[in-house]
Amino acid sequence: MTYDVLGPGGLDYLPCRYGSSRVLFRGPQRSLTAPYLAFLGGTETYGKFIRSPFPALVETDLGINCVNFGVQNAGVDVFAADPAVLEAASNAEVTVIQILGAQNMSNRYYSVHPRRNDRFVTASTLLRTIYDDVDFAEFHFTRHMLSELYSVSEDRFATIRSELQATWVARMRVMLRQIAGKIVLLWVADHAPTDHDVIGLDPVKAGNPLFITRQMIDELAPLVSDVVEVVASPVALANGFNGLVFAEMEAPAAAETLGPMVHREAAVALSDTLLGMI
């Protein structure tokens, strides 16, 4: 097992902004002069602990400028509410959108930070009524909050999960319709999408992207050009830490990260698809 443990700063992600966006994306900054490919997504697209995440690998493979709009722990909201990103995506040859979990977005039960979507902001009156035995003041992150709600009552939690799933599909539809041109949805995870909802599973222990089923993806398929499904191979998962770069204090988070071999597998699958679209 090989990996690089750096000083307190870990990798330098060369954070940058594009246009009027207030969000910091991974650099180095790329030109938004056509032609280019746009990549929207979360921690995997951003490439946390990864020297060359899959957008950079696709750029090398295809020889076309690839703009990484990945955001760590992102939900749909950070992109759907950012006109600068949506404009850049509309001007791209193709936009690749990583399928993100349904937990990190505002909904009728709770709200999240507009740019750091994993940050829980406040519970609605409705959620406080359903869970009148929970003190929401102690929560700072969505996944921790949802795990606690699940542990208090699986029956009540089923209502929350259904709301998140319905909201995710609706918000994805709105975002996809705002992007002109070709769109590819990307599933990248250590497991395939489930055909049915996983009931009775603690959100903290469930795999990413959280709460997303194959049926939900199928509902969006008519709005996109293609769906690319990348399930990490056993060899890639076994390599785990190999090639990751992180500070010593980041080791627990790095242990849960999809490694460089998974990024290579994603790049190969995407390059094969994108080659016929550009």
Image: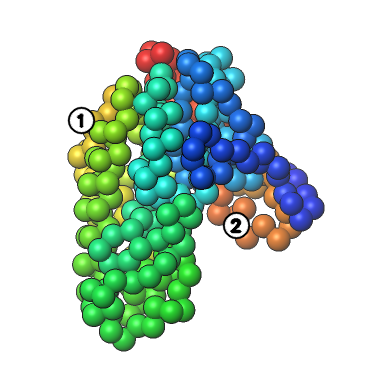
Q: Give the crowd class for mark 2: few <14, some 14-19, many >=20 residues within 10 Å.
A: few
Image coordinates of residue 51 in percent, x first then y, are 66, 37
Between 128 and 55, the one nearer to me in the picture: 128
Taking the spot 29% from the left edge, 71% from the top edge, the residue there is 124
Which of the numbered marks, if any, corresponds to residue 125? none
Q: Residue at x 37, y 26 (%)?
A: 90
Q: Which color scheme is applied?
A: rainbow
Side of 110 where 21 appears, left or right: right
Q: Position of residue 213 (x, y in %)?
A: 27, 48
Does any portion of residue 129 appear in the rendered image? yes
Q: Secondary structure at mark 2?
A: helix
Q: Is residue 162 above or below residue 170?
A: below
Figure quadrant of residue 135: bottom left
Residue 21 relative to residue 259: left or right: left
**Quarter containing the C terminus:** top left
The quarter of the picture where residue 201 lies is bottom left
Locate residue 257 relative to residue 123 in the image: left or right. right
Left or right side of 88 for 126: left
Amino acid type at image mark 2: Ala
For label 1, the residue is: 222
Q: Is residue 264 above or below residue 197?
A: above
Q: CA distance from mark 2 to mark 1?
A: 36 Å
Mark 1 falls on what kind of element? helix
Numbered badge on residue 253:
2
| Residue at the spot 47% in from the left edge and 15% down from the top edge | 35
Asked whether 37 or 98 is in front, the reply is 37
Q: Percent x, y for residue 204? A: 43, 65
- Dot 1: within a 10 Å radius of its alpha carbon, few (fewer than 14), some, or many (20 or more) residues? few
* Mark 2 or 1, closer to the camera: 1
Q: Nearer the viewer, residue 12 or 239?
A: 12
